[in-house]
Amino acid sequence: MWCCRPAPPGAAPERGRRPPVLPAHSCVEPRLCRHHLSGREPSDVKYRAVFFDVDGTLVDSNDMHVLAWEEAFRSIEADFDRATIHGQIGKGKDMLVPTLIPDADAELIEQLGEAHGAVFKPDLLEQVRPFPGAHDLLARVHAAGQAVVLASSASAEEVDHYLDLLDARGLVHASTSSGDVEHTKPAPDIYAAALKKVAPLSAEEVLVVGDSPYDVEAASKCGIATIALLSGKFPEKTLREAGAIAIYDDVAALLAEYDRSPLGR
């Protein structure tokens, strides 16, 4: 449903009064209007909002999360090799821990999540750098009139840090964090929360850009298509089998192919 109300056809003005000059459309709520979100008329663009995963997609942080989780598991004398941990990156603690420790209860999940944060936030977060082209891709999407949303399950503190790191505060329409949801990816909660922030847009009008199969799975559960990037170091086959509609090396490669990619069609 559009919140733009078409200008009424020229009704006869009251006697002695000049007819008002009406805009092409008026909005009940400009912030939620498809026209204002996209900056284009509806026929000009298929996807009017783009949901970006952050870790492994816009910023080079996956290996650092692996190190933090490795230390967290060591704190309870659980030893997992880095490849095993990496295979779960993209999930939050609620999904990652039970996958590796099936009998983990809520207390242990919380304990390990806190241990991960105790390593990542003070020691590793400041070392995270944006991938080359990350800011420029966000700027390109924004300039095209598409709403930019950071759809992350990281903590609100981390998302806020990344907004500055990416110099993206003036480019981002909305963002999500772990505080917005009950379950992290591959549950659909993150993208469902992001959809609410671009209402009244539908899932068919949104595209996800992510680096993990969990991004693709979560988006698919919401009816959203996903462009996958190899920058998170997940195998191309894994991303394709998860259902990615297109795969690029990284944000720089996607930016270079913008007009020919699903983003620009």
Image: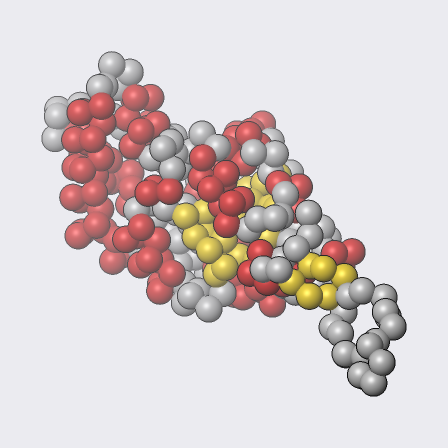
Residue 83 showing in the rendered view: no
x, y percentage for residue 245?
Answer: 64, 38
The colour scheme applied to this rendered structure is secondary structure
Residue at 62% of width from left, 41% of height from top? Answer: 203
Residue 156: image x %, image y %? Answer: 31, 50
Q: Tell me which corner region of the image, top left, top right, bottom left or bottom right, holds residue 111.
A: top left
Q: Which residue sits furthest top?
A: 103
Q: Nearer the viewer, residue 12 or 113?
A: 12
- Using the rendered image of the protein, determine whether residue 142 is visible from the camera's viewpoint: yes
Q: Viewed as shown, does residue 202 lie left or right of 194? A: right
Q: Residue at x 31, y 29 (%)?
A: 94
Query: Closest to the observer: 144 or 135?
Result: 144
Q: Position of residue 104 (x, y in %)?
A: 23, 19
- The x, y position of residue 242, in whole percent, is 56, 29
For the image, the number of numbered tags is: 0
Q: Name the residue: 45% across, 29% down.
A: 187
Of all residues, the one furthest to the front in this rendering is 15
Residue appearing at x 65%, y 62% in the figure: 27
197 left or right, relative to 178? right
